[in-house]
Amino acid sequence: MHVTIYAVVPGETREEALEIAETVFGGLQERRAFDYYVICPPTDVHWITDITGWETLEAAMSAQDREFLRYLDKVKRILNTHTAEDILNSSSSCRDLDLQLFRHNCFNLGKYEGYPLIVYSEGGDAVRNCRELQELMAKEKQVLWLVSADTHF
């Protein structure tokens, strides 16, 4: 599956931002967050304060939030419809697909990198919610750039 991910990185210039983003994406690939990536061309790198950069970042954070809520809803549904014993004893041969995937859905809720997380900081840490994004923006003194990469999970 191909997914576009983003790095919010500081930089004096677009080229410096691309270099920093390259290390972010390279580090994630080394940690096996995804199989491979292709970084965007320089023309697609934007300040997060310009309209294109901000709208793209908002859309990415919204998509990430939707995925989190989708997994959370699946977990809640199983917790509300099955006993703890059902969940504990479920296996891959279980006929209830949601019950089969319960542990997988819990795993995705607790992730710190890899899909469904698509926004990362300079340190390669996922920016998992708006509070973390605000903290990142508040502590950085340089201009922040949004750099994207097409990844394969």
Image: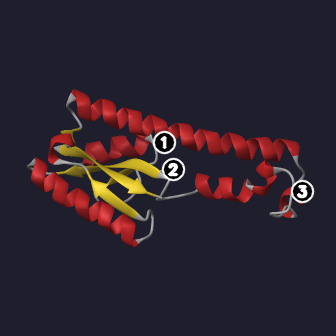
Viewer-side residue, 132 vs 55: 55
Q: Which mark is residue 86?
A: 3
Secondary structure of residue under mark 3: helix
Q: Residue at x 43, y 49 (%)?
A: 3
Residue 88: x and y in percent read 85, 62
> Do the residues bearing badges 1 and 3 touch, measured as CB atoms within 8 Å?
no
Q: Badge 3: how crowded within 10 Å, few (<14), some, or many (20+)?
A: some
Q: Which mark is residue 116?
A: 2
Q: Badge 2: how crowded within 10 Å, few (<14), some, or many (20+)?
A: many
Q: Badge 1: how crowded within 10 Å, few (<14), some, or many (20+)?
A: many
Q: How many marks?
A: 3
Viewer-side residue, 37 vs 123: 37
Going by the numbered disc 3, the residue's amino acid type is: Asp
Q: Residue furthest front?
A: 1
Going by the numbered disc 2, the residue's amino acid type is: Pro
Q: Residue at x 89, y 56 (%)?
A: 86
Question: Where is mark 1, residue-wise?
Answer: 64
Q: Quadrant of residue 84?
A: bottom right
Q: Is residue 78 visible?
A: yes
Q: Quadrant of residue 43?
A: top left
> Do the residues bearing badges 2 and 1 touch, measured as CB atoms within 8 Å?
yes
Secondary structure of residue under mark 2: loop
